[in-house]
Image (cartoon, grey):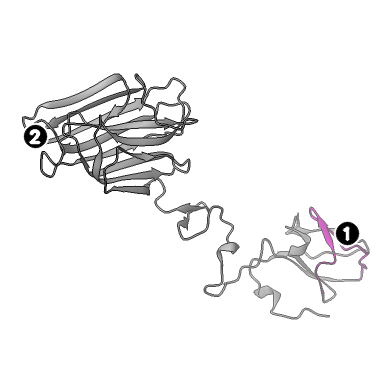
Amino acid sequence: MAYIGRDTDKISNVEVLDNITFDGSSSYTLQKNSVNFTPSSANTLLVSIDGVVQAGNFTVSGSTIDFGTAVAGTSTCDFILHYGVGLITLPSDGTVSLAKLSATGTKDATTFLRGDNTFAEAGGGAFEKISTTTISSSVASVDFNTLSTDYKDFKIVISSLVINTHQEAVLIKVKRSGQSSFDGGSGEYRFNTIGNRSQDGNTISDGSNSNNKIQLNATSIARDATVDGATFNATINVVDPHGTTNTKFFYWNCAYVEGTYGATASNQGAGYRYDTSETALIGVQIAGGGSAQFISGTITLYGRKI
């Protein structure tokens, strides 16, 4: 029977191929503008012979179409249409689901579709919060026992930290891959800090090429019980701790009330766990120096995916 439906010239994304001149053979060469044409598949072709539309009753190989039986030389090819990769139609509003998209990556409420047809988390390259520890009673340290491999770099923010021992320090220690505890042996860390204090504008500094910890402060820290309102604050960057061919650098900026004059002090610094094997890090500890404990404040861990 003849084709029933909307006119074939109203279908979009359709290529019109050259009509075939039948000669009693079963197979013929497909052409467009007298040039051999290779369709996407047999299912993307619509052929009309003697007013009857053929679909699915032939095969194609390259640019050859085979009807599986001889087509009489008296038959007429009315048209051959190639649909390409699919019809272009306008879907109704709200009818295209995520499952219909070819984009790769996680498709959920935390991601967006990028121009390269992949889903990614918003703010790619920016730091996102992983966890926060709020200190409400005395603790000797705050331990981040897992540094997720989902992140390349990390940042630790120390806010309004109060210590219970006057003229003490805030320290960093690390846990390496394959270990269950934080390193604290002699000669395992190297660090340097330098800054100024408001009392006299003098430079404050500290450092060591062989120590059992990394020290953040360049001069001693005051406790709140001795200097009212005394706190310690810092932003610490942790660079590529999962790497196995690099030094695991920490670098930081901190501001605090120092313990000698009760003055404002600020310093920057850098340090690392000395390790000739360049072992990946799996944990970071923020601890009080000596017997000092933290009695209030927050310490937050952030991560950055690249």
Packing grade of label 2 (10 A; few <14, some 14-19, many >=20) is: some
User: Would you say 2 lies left or right of 72 here?
Assistant: left
Between 85 and 244, the residue placed more toward the observer is: 244
Between 27 and 105, the residue placed more toward the observer is: 105
Q: In the rendered image, which residue does mark 1 sit on?
A: 27
Q: Which residues are drawn in magenta?
A: 53-74
Tell me the distance, in whole angstroms, between the alpha carbons under discs 1 and 2: 93 Å
Examine the image and state in which quarter residue 221 appears.
top left
Secondary structure, magenta segment, majority class: loop
Using the image, determine if residue 145 lies above or below residue 273.
below
Q: How far from the left and from the top, in percent, is residue 257? A: 14, 37
User: Would you say 101 lies left or right of 50 here?
Assistant: left
Q: How far from the left and from the top, in percent, is residue 299? A: 30, 44
Residue drawn at point x = 39 percent, y = 31 percent: 182
Q: For residue 275, which numbered disc appears in the image? A: none
Residue lying at the far left of the rendered structure: 200
User: Would you say 50 lies left or right of 159 here?
Assistant: right
The kind of residue on which mark 2 rests is Ser
Between 156 and 211, the residue placed more toward the observer is: 211
Between 281 and 105, the residue placed more toward the observer is: 281
The kind of residue on which mark 1 rests is Ser
Q: In the rendered image, which residue does mark 2 sit on?
A: 198
Q: Look at the image and say whether residue 60 sits in the magenta stretch.
A: yes
Examine the image and state in which quarter residue 16 appears.
bottom right
Q: How many marks?
A: 2
Residue drawn at point x = 70 percent, y = 74 percent: 8
Packing grade of label 1 (10 A; few <14, some 14-19, many >=20) is: some
Disc 1 is placed on an element classified as strand
Residue drawn at point x = 39 percent, y = 27 percent: 183
Q: How far from the left and from the top, in percent, is residue 291? A: 25, 32
